[in-house]
Image (cartoon, rainbow, N blue to C red):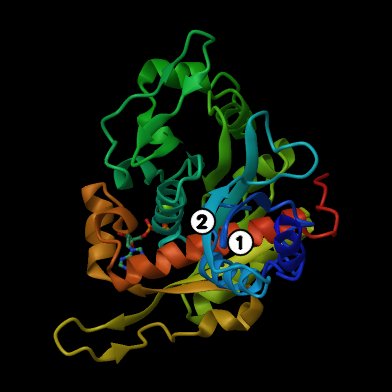
Amino acid sequence: MREAVLGALRTVNDPELHRDLVSLGMIERIDVDGGSVTVKVNLTTPACPMKATIERDVREAVMTVPGAESVSVEFGAQVRVTGTPAMPGVKHVLLIGSGKGGVGKSSVAVNIACALANSGAAVGLLDADVYGPSVAHMLGQSEAKLVGNAERKMLPIQAHGVRFISMANLSPAGQALIWRGPMLHSAIKQFLSDAAWGELDYLIVDLPPGTGDVQLSITQSVQVTGAVIVTTPQDVALIDAARAIDMFRKANVPLLGVVENMSYFVAPDTGAVYDIFGRGGSRKLGSHQLLGEVPLDTEVRRDADAGTPAVIAHPDNPAARALIQIAENLAGRVSVQTLSELPMAQLA
Ligand SMILES: Nc1ncnc2c1ncn2[C@@H]1O[C@H](COP(=O)(O)OP(=O)(O)O)[C@@H](O)[C@H]1O
Ligand SMILES: [Mg+2]
């Protein structure tokens, strides 16, 4: 019966990759015990947004096999990478950018990082917003100091399952060590490659707003899987977001999607919905790009200031749920981009 089960699984496509689970190498194990079948599926990310669909499809396919009476589906996950990884031990570098400041880029970056880590992925977060570092504060670690390990590599600080490095945590001594060169470029390169990140599935980078030197430095220093643009929905923010998207296109960095933050507001007392900045405006950037909409929510702001991101502190809050879904959608797009037949854009 094992062969028949395998045959049935060849008819099940991954909903995003549009190829069958067997040829994608996602079937790790099939156990048959009388009429009961156990299938272990190895997902391409622990934050897989399609897990429920895959489980249902596997169950339905196996139940068509003569003699199959019950099916149990188990999941494992391994983030895939094609070719050489971004850096030794780091599978994917994901940039979070914006056109304007204050649109919630850091909030989105921190919540995505925590949501991915919470799903079981190994996640790093680099605060590359050297002009306004806020990652340490949002992770409740503004007092922590960065130190080096025995090999004089900077050790990321741990918080909520995420390893992060932020300028805000540099002691004066550390500052001298890091800012050896007069240029921002060498500092960014050191943050990326002279830090002891260890094994990471995703290294999230919170960029400064706009289209400046830091963005260029990063795209020139390391192979980037793709970028996410955070914007609010009103025109004045979208104009700058379009400019940021254009910059990534020129640098051959694939756009993984757009997050519409502060999309709308639900009044907690009446439940009335207010489109403060014009909900849905980010669709002007291409509706297929949208990773999700995050409402304005007092708890998101309060949790960020208290140092425990909303996806951890209040995972059932609607804004937190939107952020968790966005993290999963992003992980799904990274898998699609990695496993699709198209060659990955090579950076100059
Ligand atoms: N969806 C949201 N709801 C409520 N407050 C938010 C939301 N997103 C961000 N904020 C708050 O807005 C301010 C700016 O966000 P921040 O992430 O620092 O923006 P940026 O990194 O783009 O400058 C912060 O005080 C943050 O807590
Ligand atoms: Mg910021």
Residue in front for this viewpoint, 34 or 324: 34
Asked which secondary structure carries label 1, the reply is helix
Place residue 147 in its image quadrant. top left
Residue at (56, 18) in percent of width and height:
180
Please indicate whether residue 132 sits to the left or right of residue 235 in the image. Answer: left
- Outermost residue, top side: 150
**Label 1 is placed on what type of residue?**
Gly
Dividing the image into 4 quarters, which one contains the N terminus?
A: bottom right
In the depicted structure, whether residue 243 falls above or below residue 90? below
Residue 286 visible in the snapshot: no
Label 1, on which residue?
Answer: 332
Residue at 27% over, 49% down = 308
Vertical placement of 244 versus 130: above or below? below
Residue 85 appears in the figure: yes
Q: Earlier in the sequence, mark 1 or mark 2?
A: 2
Q: Which mark is residue 321?
A: none
Residue, disc 2: 47
Image coordinates of residue 228 in percent, x first then y, are 58, 60
